[in-house]
Amino acid sequence: MRQESELTGEERAELERLRAEVARLRASVPAEAPGRPPGRPVVRGRWRTVVATLLIVVGCVLAPLSVVAVWTRNQVTNTDRYVATVTPLADDPAIQAAIADQITAKVFTYIDVQGVTNQAVQVLADRGLSPTVASQLQALAVPIASGIQSFTRDQVGKVVASDAFADAWVQANRAAHEELVRALTGEGGGAVTVENDTVSVNLAAFIQVVKQRLVDAGFTIASRIPEVEASFVLFQSKDITRVRAGFNLLNTLGIWLPILALILLAIGVYVAKDHRRALVGAALGVAVGMVLLALGLAVFRSIYLDAVPATVLPHDAAAVLYDTIVRFLRLGLRTVLVLALVVAAGAFLSGSSVTAVRTRQGLNEAIGWLAGSAERAGLRTGPVGVWVGANKRALRIAAVTVAALALVFWGRPTGKVVLGLTLALLIVLAIIEFLARPARVTATS
């Protein structure tokens, strides 16, 4: 009788499938203990299935909430992450245009250019200016006012588009981070405020910069602008109170909710009779949860855009603002989605289904063909191949462990990182399979 080490790749795959099938059949027909009433094991198995299903379903429901909770907590407790979130807003043309328009409008609430022009014409008329010339100057009051307003808007636009504004934006947001926390937790105060149905940022400091810029450009009438309070609306909705309450809840659960979801999923997989099938179901459930979260963000985006009037914030600026704020949340859910799909695929392909067995068999045959070609070409692995063959199982476990640790300790993993690590793991496993040689074959070669 041949030993297992002498089997071909196809025979080894078939043997593995038969063993898995025998194990599955034995598990499906549990032995009854002496004296135990008939049917007790079946009932117990059903309860295991019900409990496992319930735990996995609850864990999958908590998965998208966990992603939202972690994102929310990061925005609150991590100043660098918050600043990284809002920094691109200062360089976006739509946001720059909206801020420049608001600052310009605020400036001209304190400067009546047309009134000043009319007053100057009246003074000249009182000093003997001919009625014809005075009438012509009076007709120019509106174009003059429009020209001055256009000039002011250009100056404001230059300020908002400058690197100095971008730096000031970053510094102001970094300094206002604690004030944002107070605002979202209901304490209020500071540069970022939540009042009634509106979340806004104070632009008073930027108006002072514009005022000085206009004065330096020769528009001395801008010196009349007093220190005023002007706000840039970030969000406006009648549900802001409930949103803030939900924020506080998610911030509290930011640490424990992901841990709870993972524990429930792990216990559900452990309790299930078929661990591999339960793992596939749990991973696919988490993936579905991420897809639903993405759909929820898309729906909430429409609600947000409808809730902000165009007179408060232009539609394009509101869209950029929303997409920028939630981009890390979208990145997180995509990462979890890819990871869940990778886990589901790995658990499925390691099972005893016909598709999984044929897939593994095909890969083993391909690797075996490459190894045979290398042997025929004179490329032998020698003692290294013997050692790899003897420790193949340990090397596989080590490769999977290293990949898992790399993912856990990766600073900010993305979907691309997950796919990259998965691809690297598959390559390492293929190399192990390619190098492995039975001791007898190497010794006789």
Image (cartoon, rainbow, N blue to C red):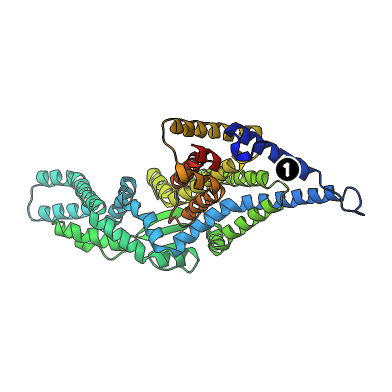
Residue beneath the point at 48% across and 43% down:
385
Camera-side residue of 12 and 187: 12
User: Looking at this view, is 220 or 255 the one in front?
Assistant: 255
**Residue under the image location 23 percent in, 49 percent down:** 149
Q: Amino acid at mark 1?
A: Ala
Total numbered labels placed on residues in the image: 1
Q: Is residue 394 left or right of residue 120?
A: right
Q: Position of residue 266 (x, y in %)?
A: 64, 54
| Residue 80 horizontal side relative to residue 142, left or right | right
Q: Residue furthest front?
A: 444
Task: Give percent across and percent down for residue 377.
Answer: 41, 31
Q: Secondary structure at mark 1?
A: helix
Name the residue rendered at 43%, 49% in the picture: 327
Looking at the image, residue 410 lies above or below residue 376: below
Q: Residue at x 48, y 39 (%)?
A: 434
Alpha-carbon neighbours of circle 1 within 10 Å: few (<14), some, or many (≥20)? few
- To which residue does mark 1 refer? 23
